Every structure is written in C-alpha cells, then in structure tokens.
Image (spheres, rainbow, N blue to C red):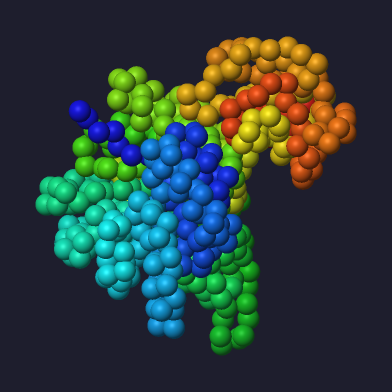
Amino acid sequence: MQIKTELLAPAGNLEKLKIALGYGADAVYGGVSSFSLRIRSGKEFDMESFDEGIKHAHALGKKVYVTINSFPFNSQIKLYEKHIAQMSELNPDALIVASPGIVKMAHSIAPNIPIHLSTQANVMNALDAQVYYDMGVKRIIAAREISLKDCEAIKSILPDLELEVFVHGSMCFAYSGRCLISALQMGRVPNRGSCANDCRFPYEIFAHNPETNTTFRLDEEEGVGTYIMNAKDMNMASHIDEIISSGVIDSLKIEGRTKSPYYAGVVTKAYRHAIDDYYAGDFVAQRYQDELNTTQNRGFTDAYLISRPFERHDTQSHDFTIQYGSHQVAALVSMDGKTWRCKDKTSIGDKVEIVLPVGACLELIDNEYGTITHEDGAYWLTIKKIISTDGREFDSIHSGDTRDILLPTTLPSYTILRRGIDEALINKGLCESGGCPS
C-alpha cells in the first residue's frame, strides 16, 4: 500500500491547530515559550492548551510536532532541559530542534520521542545529513535553498532518513534565520525567535563622501521600488506532482504560525487537494493556485526546490511589502458551528461564500436568519438577520466586534465565510464600485 506524503501545517494557537487539522493537515507543528522560533505564537499556547491540542490531534489520528528550535545561550541550558522534560510528558509525536547539543539533550531526556532537525540547521547535503542521522535524528527539515536533486542524493545514501521540505509561506532574505539585520536595527535576534522582519521595510539609499562629509540620496529608478530585501512568498503548489513523484519527500510543510486562521484553513485545504488529486490522477495546478491567490501575499515564487538559486530572477518584490488576495474573510464560524464572529464589516442582505473544512457538506436551507444556496460549485450564505447570542439585533456588524452571531443552521466547526476583495474594499469605503485595485 502506497503511503501518502504527509501534509504538515502551522499551529500558531489552539484555534489555528484545530483549523489546520480540520482543513486537511496530517500533522501540525507549534510550540510553547521562547524556545520556539516564533516567540509570538509560542506565547499564544500554554502547557494546558498545547496538551489539549495534542489530545485533539491524536483523537483524529493525526500528529503534533513540538518546536524547540531556537539556539540556546549558556544561561538557558537548564531551562531547555526542564522544557524538554515538560513537553515530553504531553506525548508529542516529535521534537523539532536545531542545534547538535539540543539533539543530544533531547535524546537523553526524551529517548522515546523522535527528533526532527529544524531547517535552522541548514542541511543541504548528504554529508551533513549523515552526521545528524548518526546522532539519531529521524527526519531532517531541509534548508529552503535545497534542490530536489539534492534531496534525491541524500535519500539515495540515507533511505531511512525522512526528508521534509517547505512548499508554501514566507521566505527568509538570508539562509533561514541567519540574517543579522533585525539584531542590528532592533536588537531582536532572528535565530532566537524574535525576527522583526526588517527585510520587509522600504529603504532609501545614500552615498557618502568622507572627504567632503557630503551625503547624497540616490533616487531609485521609477518602477523598481525600494523594498530591496523583500523576498516573495514561496508557492510550490504547481509542482506538488513533481515533488511527490520523486519518491524522496516524506512531508510537505506550510510556513505561517503567526498568520491568520483564514490562511491556516485555505492554504492547508489547497495543498490537501493538490496531494489527494495527485494520487487520484487528477492534478490540475491552476485549481490550487486559484485558492492560494485568495490570501494576502508578497507575490509568489516557486523558489529553489525545482530551479537552482542562480537560475531565479523573480524571488523578490521590490515595489510592495504585501498585497491583497482576491478575497477577504467576512467571518469565522465557532467550533460548535452555531455562531459566527465578524472579521470584516457584514450587513443584512450580504451574500458571502462558505468555505468548508475538508470532507464537509451542507444542506440547503432558507429561514428567517438566512439562506444557504449552492451555485457555480460553491455554497453561499445570504444573511437575513444579524442577532447575537445575547439577543441584540443589528443592521451591520464590524470587524473587532466580538459578539457571537447566530447562524441560520449549524455549520461545520471553523467554517470560513468570505467575500471578493472588491466588495470588501467598497464596504470599507476604500474604493468605489468599478474603481477597486485589481
């Protein structure tokens, strides 16, 4: 029986963990505390909620990998030991670590939990992979700069070593986590989880003459832009067939623990469909790109896995830091499926698209609260009443309002309601009909 390549999605908090699993992930990754490379998302979990997330995943037959992948100071070693011991008690499916010392420590403290080597270790060749494999590492998360051919070379020498590659999400301007710009400008150290994303800022360029102590501002060529270090987002959806058919990749990883619940759901679902369609012999790249284009992004690139870095000239966005996707989230349905919470101004009479978790379906209904229809291959909700659980009634409700609004029927947990970006911008008063950005 052929084992499907794993789909691994980000879990920035308990809600996003449940969304990622509901929208098709086989496994999720996340962490607690500052020992994770995403301090902000690590703070959104505590031991109790992370334990709940692991139990939720295991009840679904799915996995959770714990991120302990920052690099320790000497003063933190005892804290790492304590943290690994605490996390091991939760029975996660793997520990993701970055340094050889922590690999050794994790094996000593939690010998029964598999070790996955973080992309922070920047493994790109069989020589380095062999060293970590000999140390007991079960899986290597390859550097984002690796090629598929290099993965094939590693696997030919180490067939029992699992290989995981990133297929979607933010790209680092440097080798992952090795950039010092954030530390220099903000005092926030990237490889300890607190990168300030300084590469996403616009910069002005100056020339200084020390002999005359004169400084000139250099004007950039019109249309080239000043986001000179801003890497586009990785998007490998169109190459999932090539990656899986290579036979050497065990897990496909989506980046984005600090991104929105919408991102966690829609991106995971798109890659779930790409993987399943490949195995079903029905792979259609544009199908997945249409969904991924609904998310905010910095422009997309297929990065380096298929093409080598020196062959690429489209990996940076010089004229903007981020752009709208084709859609905007209107609301997110609660876990019990009975209410929705506003994420974008929504009014009586609005018609929003219903994005369902993987495998879910709906019955068409029409009652005093709203109508659910099925048109052009999608489900739609037309809102007739906006009534909160405390009995208050509204003509419109705005983003930031945390009231739970009653649905016309129970929907699957964490169903997403969305609208086209033009309609969303018109609702916000940011553009007029016919004059919205493309």
136 lies above or below 353: below
Closest to the observer: 327 or 64? 64
Q: Where is residue 402 in the image (x, y as percent from the top left)?
A: 76, 43
Q: Is residue 286 left or right of residue 124?
A: right
Find the residue positioned furthest to the bottom. Answer: 211
Name the residue rendered at 62%, 85% in the picture: 213
330 lies above or below 183: above
| Quarter residue 283 falls in | top left
Kindly tell me whether residue 190 is visible in this rendering: no
Quadrant where the image shows the N terminus? top left
Name the residue rendered at 56%, 26% in the picture: 356
| Quarter residue 4 falls in | top left
Q: Position of residue 303 (x, y in %)?
A: 38, 46
Q: In this view, does 13 lie to the left or right of 144?
A: right
Closest to the observer: 301 or 101? 101
409 lies above or below 41: above
Kindly tell me whether residue 31 is visible in this rendering: yes
Q: Where is residue 407 in the image (x, y as percent from the top left)?
A: 72, 26
48 lies above or below 386: below
Quadrant where the image shows the C terminus? top right
